[in-house]
Amino acid sequence: MSWEENVRKVVPYTPGEQPKINNIIKLNTNECPYPPAPSVKRAMDSFEYETLRLYPDPNSGSLISALSDYYNVPSDQIFVGVGSDDVLSMAFLTFFNSDKPILFPDITYSFYDVWADLYKIPYKQIPLDEDFRIKKEDYYIENGGVIFPNPNAPTGLVEDLDMVEDILQNNNEVVVIVDEAYIDFGGKSALPLIDKYENLLVVQTFSKSRAMAGMRIGFAFGSKKLIGYLNDAKFSFNSYTMNRPSLELGAATLADKEYFNETCSRIIATRERVKPLLAELGFVFPDSSSNFIFAKHKTVSGKKIFEELRSRGIIVRRWDLPRISEYLRITIGTDEQMDTLISALKEIV
Ligand code: PMP
């Protein structure tokens, strides 16, 4: 027997490319095209580097307290992690511990099946309908837990809170996770439902709408009991997940509500301006409520457009997966970047 037989083997998640070249238009990982809030810059400038000598607060007190004030949720109902990927990974480990399969859409965030494989959680991928909508009735079957993003990624489609609540009502014996990475760009957060459903975990991030992907800050809201279980798992895994700069700069971003609202509005305005331009060029796409558009062309192949854009220094995201191989996921950049994209697409198609 070889030592390799006992190795935990996984096919890892492939993150979007972070190219080293300059002068590219990077529309492939749903980052914010604008800088973080000025309050973050100020906090960075006054950060005391000597404090890096000391471990950070294992309870992430300052960040949790800032989130608590901002969202008006008690501190013991908030959990933070190294990006929402860390929060979600910890939630999979903590809450999905049944022999029955967990359920998530067939077209969704492609990290879910990776975590399920890593933790040996059985799962069932539920097909979206032909318009890429979640069919709530499909989630009434027996299962070990439910997770879906709202808005969904990479489709960009948002479901209303009635649908989210219907799924909760039909799944009161398992944990239901709503991944709201893109909620600030459209739709209603399920946050108010955490008081009504003890089994609901709502996960959000500073990576997209707060332009802090490089800082790695994610957070979750849930019942006191749910957050308690998450903390037990976290403290059995790594006590010091959040470093000192994250705790300070994360709290600082929440201080500038005006800048946040302005940035989100700009991205939404650009998205709405680009939609008819793409349609004119022969693209079809679900009506996105997020900071990206998931589009395919009526005649030209996704692979060709992807490569042609790339040769012009414009990078978007594409998956060679069933049902979506013709689609490109295009992050909403600045107006100028989107104009360059539209000109390039005009030449290509
Ligand atoms: N959920 C969804 C649906 C995402 O698209 C992403 C971004 N890749 C994440 C979670 C994780 O984002 P982060 O770890 O940067 O918070």
Image (cartoon, rainbow, N blue to C red):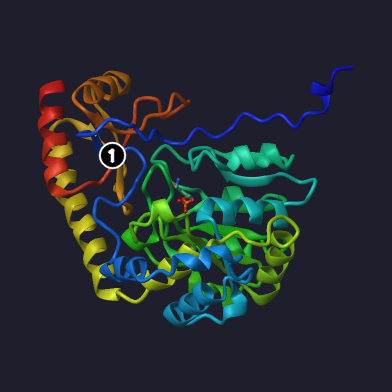
Q: Quadrant of the C terminus?
A: top left
- Residue in front for this viewpoint, 127 or 153: 153
Q: Can you give x and y, in whole percent of width and height, for residue 170 in the image?
A: 64, 61
- Residue in front for this viewpoint, 162 or 285: 285
Q: Residue furthest right?
A: 1
Q: Which quarter of the figure has residue 116?
A: top right
Q: Quadrant of the N terminus?
A: top right
- Residue in front for this viewpoint, 279 or 337: 337
In this rendering, the answer to whether 125 lies above or below 311 is below
Q: Which quarter of the figure has residue 285?
A: top left
Q: Can you give x and y, in whole percent of width and height, for residue 106 in the image?
A: 53, 38
Q: Is residue 140 visible?
A: no
**Classed neighbour count for the residue bearing mark 1: other residues with Cα under 10 Å, few (<14), some (14–19), many (≥20):** many
Q: Residue at horizontal 13%, vertical 48%? A: 335
Left or right side of 221 for 260:
left
The residue that disc 1 covers is: 27
Q: Can you give x and y, in whole percent of width and height, for residue 62 in the image?
A: 51, 76
Q: Residue at horizontal 71%, vertical 57%? A: 95
Q: Is residue 339 visible?
A: yes
Ligand 1 within 8 Å of the CB at mark 1: no
- Residue in front for this viewpoint, 57 or 205: 57
Q: Residue at horizontal 16%, vertical 42%? A: 338
Left or right side of 205 for 122:
right
Residue type at numbered disc 1: Leu
In this rendering, the answer to whether 224 lies above or below 109 is below
